[in-house]
Amino acid sequence: MRGTAGEQKEESLVIYLKAGEMYLSDKPALVVTVLGSCLSVTMYCRRLGLGGICHGMLPACGRRKTCDRSCPREFKYVDCSIRKMVKLFERMGARRDEIEVKCFGGSDMFQRPVERPGLITVGRQNTKTAGQIIKHEGLTLVTHDTGGNRGRKLFFYTHTGEVLVKRLNSPAGAVCSSL
């Protein structure tokens, strides 16, 4: 806490989330991450002031059907990340019907010389997997900004659930929007 005479002001905590990580807090923080084909899912429970974000690199863990504590890289995978975040939210007292879910990333970052029928890029696989898991877990996706061929820089506010998205490498300059 820092402040002047009679006034106290809480310093903002800034977290830089890397690929394969997750952050969850009921304290105010700004979480910043950069996405290409990776996918971030944010969750927010207004009643508890609880916010969380993950940065999944790959769609699914191929070693098992369910996620458990024994996996040291659980947040590397979109499917495991979402399931684990839901469990953590429930452990902190949130009900699934009050969790606001948002999804970002899943870009096709590399141009392919020839479109091959049936080829699904990692970005598209990540997006598809997230949608399936969100639906399977009984959650509601309130908004998303996925796909395309541009990276994104996210600014997630854990205490409000607000997400600012800056699209990277845009020919017309960076575009920032609030979701």
Image: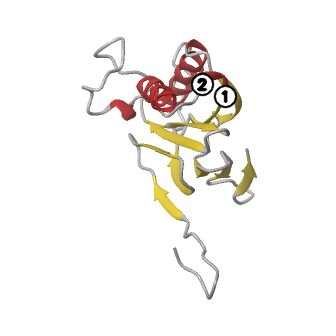
Contact flag, marks 2 and 1 (Cβ < 8 Å): yes
Residue 138 lies, in percent from the top left, at 61, 15
The span from disc 2 to disc 1 (Cα, nearest Å) is 6 Å
Q: Which residue is drawn at 71% across and 60% down?
A: 173
Task: Identify residue type, mark 1.
Answer: Glu
Name the amino acid type tagged 2.
Answer: Arg
Of residue 41 and residue 175, the one placed in the foreground of this image is 41
Q: Which numbered circle lies on residue 161?
A: none
Residue that appears at 31% across and 13% down: 64
Q: Extreme front residue here? A: 6
Using residue 146 as the reference point, say whether residue 172 is left or right of it. right
Say above or below: 158 vs 48.
Answer: below
Q: Residue 98 carries which label?
A: 1
Q: In this view, does 133 lie above or below 99?
A: above
Query: Where, by quadrant of the figure, is residue 57 drawn?
Result: top left
50 or 176: nearer the viewer: 50
Residue sticking out furthest to the bottom? 5
Name the one closer to the observer, 79 or 157.
Answer: 157
Q: Quadrant of residue 63?
A: top left
Q: How crowded is mark 1: few (under 14 residues within 10 Å), some or many (20 or more)?
A: some
- How many discs appear? 2
- The residue that label 2 is drawn on is 95
Task: Depth check: give the residue in front, 103 or 121.
Answer: 103
Q: If the image is split into quadrants, where does the C terminus sit?
A: top right
User: Picture coordinates of residue 80 (x, y %)?
Assistant: 41, 25
Secondary structure at numbered mark 2: loop
SS type, badge 1: helix
> Residue 56, percent across and down?
45, 35
Q: How crowded is mark 2: few (under 14 residues within 10 Å), some or many (20 or more)?
A: some
In this rendering, the answer to whether 125 lies above or below 174 is above
